[in-house]
Image (cartoon, grey):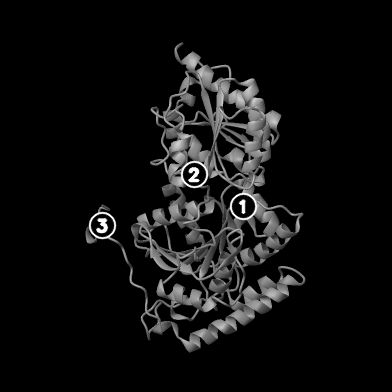
């Protein structure tokens, strides 16, 4: 069905919304099928406060997902806030279009809520890019919550990916959980990165489990590869003494990442295992804590603090290690574990959150979040490494730790991880989520009734805000009808159109 006046498909693109076709979730809507080659490609708007040039798990997840969706024939646009002088429209690899809107982050990279302040700008972006799905990321991202709220007012299908685990006791988590209740009650589908995260999200938001899918993170197996020439080398290029084992840590040096546990593990491990050295990449508020510990125990020759390392160089750090250590106190899904395993490292980690789901037991040595338990798990990983060297010359029998020589070979580990996790698989599963989102319908009255049931006070309040937002949207539509908004041209860069200039 198209608008006879403009030829634009009926629905949000014509300013008419998708209201009036049904009253409950689950009825057939405007369908798009991932298994139907004749189905038109999606135009996806990814929204979050967290995106490049900032580095982190959410930022890299969004960028990698966008690249794979583009490779599969979809159009992808990103909406985020400005970073310094990076404001306006920018293009990235493969024509990925990014809107850096002039909003200022106020706390941990998240912007302040303004309810209606940027709703008309969002409307124009949705119309110009002919968006079919709005996909928001991260519960802390205020822009993601607002985008879902306004997009649902205009009838767009919305998907929300929750990347984190939250508690139920402190004030910040209580307020964030209530906001999540209101947002997820309005979204067509929800994605979590692990089964533990799904349970946490369902408990916090009350969203029906059938509307929550689990799609894990992935890793770029072409970038994170083992390198036998670097394995065991120091960062200055000098070869370590024969038999030395390097334990790598790549994390933000903050309390949530268990830096206080790491400060307890390093002295005990260095005392118990004379052949072990530590290589730590990362920076943060607790770096002085590690520096003080290193100097107090006289471990400056065995512990190397690299400071902040760009993500492009993380693989160079991991390729020099034999074991990767993760001491986090909470993790929904630790992508750093995947990157380390893809570089051929055995992994020692705290068994918190979704970490036990990431790798099979012969590659992942779990421990309780306390230093003695982590040292024991580190001992198991070291024995698996040393046992594989000894048993490898005896025909490949299974060592005392239960690991065969082939199971700890870096190349074999890389191949196993690359087979388990790929962005192509993630993109295909996200397409299925978009298909489920398009198989739902709603009405304005049904939406207001659903929001009003989200709390004795917050529910009616948010239903009133949604009603006002609807009136504001209709006013914007009257002031500047959707048919008068010119669609943005699709820009797909061609390397042949550019000339490479060498700096002299």
What distance separates the C-alpha of mark 1 from that of mark 3? 38 Å
Work out whether 51 lies above or below 448.
above
Q: Nearer the viewer, mark 2 or mark 1?
A: 2
Work out whether 252 lies above or below 32.
above
Q: Nearer the viewer, mark 1 or mark 3?
A: 3
> Residue visible at 51% across and 40% down?
338
Q: Which residue is mark 1?
A: 164
Where residue 72 appears, as percent x and y from the top left, is 37, 55
> Which dot marks residue 495?
3
Tag 2 and tag 3, C-beta contact below 8 Å: no
Label 1 Cα crowd, 10 Å radius (few <14 / some 14-19 / many 20+) = many
Work out whether 306 lies above or below 51.
above
Under circle 1, the secondary element is: loop
Mark found first going from the N terminus, 2 or 3:
2
Tag 2 and tag 1, C-beta contact below 8 Å: no
Can I make out residue 367 in this image? no
Q: Which residue is mark 2?
A: 309
* Left or right: where 208 falls relative to 402: right
Asked whether 471 or 368 is in front, the reply is: 368
Under circle 3, the secondary element is: helix
Where residue 415 appears, as percent x and y from the top left, is 42, 34
Label 2 Cα crowd, 10 Å radius (few <14 / some 14-19 / many 20+) = some
Residue 361 image-quadrant placement: top right
Identify the image quadrant of the N terminus. Answer: bottom left
Q: Nearer the viewer, mark 2 or mark 3?
A: 2
């Amino acid at each position: 069905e198209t608008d006879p006046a403009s030829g634009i498909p009926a629905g949000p693109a014509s300013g008419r919304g998708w209201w009036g076709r049904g009253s409950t979730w689950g009825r057939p809507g405007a369908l798009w099928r991932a298994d139907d080659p004749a189905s038109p490609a999606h135009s996806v708007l990814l929204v979050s406060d967290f995106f490049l040039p900032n580095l982190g798990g959410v930022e890299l997840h969004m960028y990698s997902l966008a690249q794979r969706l583009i490779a599969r024939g979809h159009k992808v646009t990103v909406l985020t806030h400005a970073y310094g002088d990076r404001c306006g429209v920018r293009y990235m690899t493969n024509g990925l279009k990014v809107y850096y809107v002039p909003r200022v982050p106020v706390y941990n990279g998240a912007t302040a809520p303004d309810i209606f302040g940027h709703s008309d700008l969002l409307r124009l972006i949705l119309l110009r890019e002919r968006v079919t799905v709005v996909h928001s990321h991260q519960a802390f991202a205020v822009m993601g919550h607002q985008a879902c709220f306004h997009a649902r007012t205009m009838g767009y299908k919305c998907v929300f990916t929750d990347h984190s685990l939250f508690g139920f006791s402190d004030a910040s988590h209580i307020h964030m959980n209530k906001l999540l209740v209101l947002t997820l009650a309005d979204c067509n589908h929800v994605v979590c990165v692990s089964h533990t995260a799904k349970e946490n999200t369902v408990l916090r938001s009350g969203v029906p489990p059938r509307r929550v899918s689990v799609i894990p993170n992935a890793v770029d197996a072409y970038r994170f590869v083992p390198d036998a020439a670097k394995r065991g080398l120091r960062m200055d290029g000098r070869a370590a003494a024969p038999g030395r084992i390097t334990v790598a840590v790549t994390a933000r040096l903050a309390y949530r990442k268990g830096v206080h546990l790491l400060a307890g593990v390093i002295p005990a491990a260095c005392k118990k295992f004379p052949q072990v050295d530590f290589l730590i990449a990362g920076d943060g508020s607790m770096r002085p804590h590690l520096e003080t510990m290193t100097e107090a125990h006289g471990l400056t020759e065995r512990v190397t603090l690299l400071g902040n390392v760009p993500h492009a160089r993380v693989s160079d750090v991991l390729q020099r290690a034999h074991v990767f250590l993760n001491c986090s106190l909470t993790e929904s899904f630790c992508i750093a574990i995947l990157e380390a395993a893809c570089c051929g490292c055995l992994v020692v980690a705290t068994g918190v959150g979704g970490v036990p789901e990431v790798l099979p037991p012969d590659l992942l040595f779990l421990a309780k979040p306390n230093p003695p338990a982590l040292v024991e798990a580190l001992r198991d990983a070291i024995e698996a490494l040393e046992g594989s060297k000894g048993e490898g010359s005896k025909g490949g029998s299974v060592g005392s730790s239960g690991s065969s020589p082939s199971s700890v070979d870096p190349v074999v580990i890389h191949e196993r991880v690359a087979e388990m996790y790929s962005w192509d698989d993630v993109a295909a599963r996200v397409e299925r989520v978009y298909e489920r989102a398009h198989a739902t319908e709603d009405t304005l009255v049904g939406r207001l009734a659903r929001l009003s049931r989200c709390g004795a006070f917050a529910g009616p309040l948010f239903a009133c805000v949604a009603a006002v937002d609807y009136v504001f949207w209709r006013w914007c539509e009257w002031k500047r009808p959707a048919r008068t908004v010119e669609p943005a041209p699709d820009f797909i860069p061609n390397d042949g159109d550019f000339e490479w200039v060498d700096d002299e």
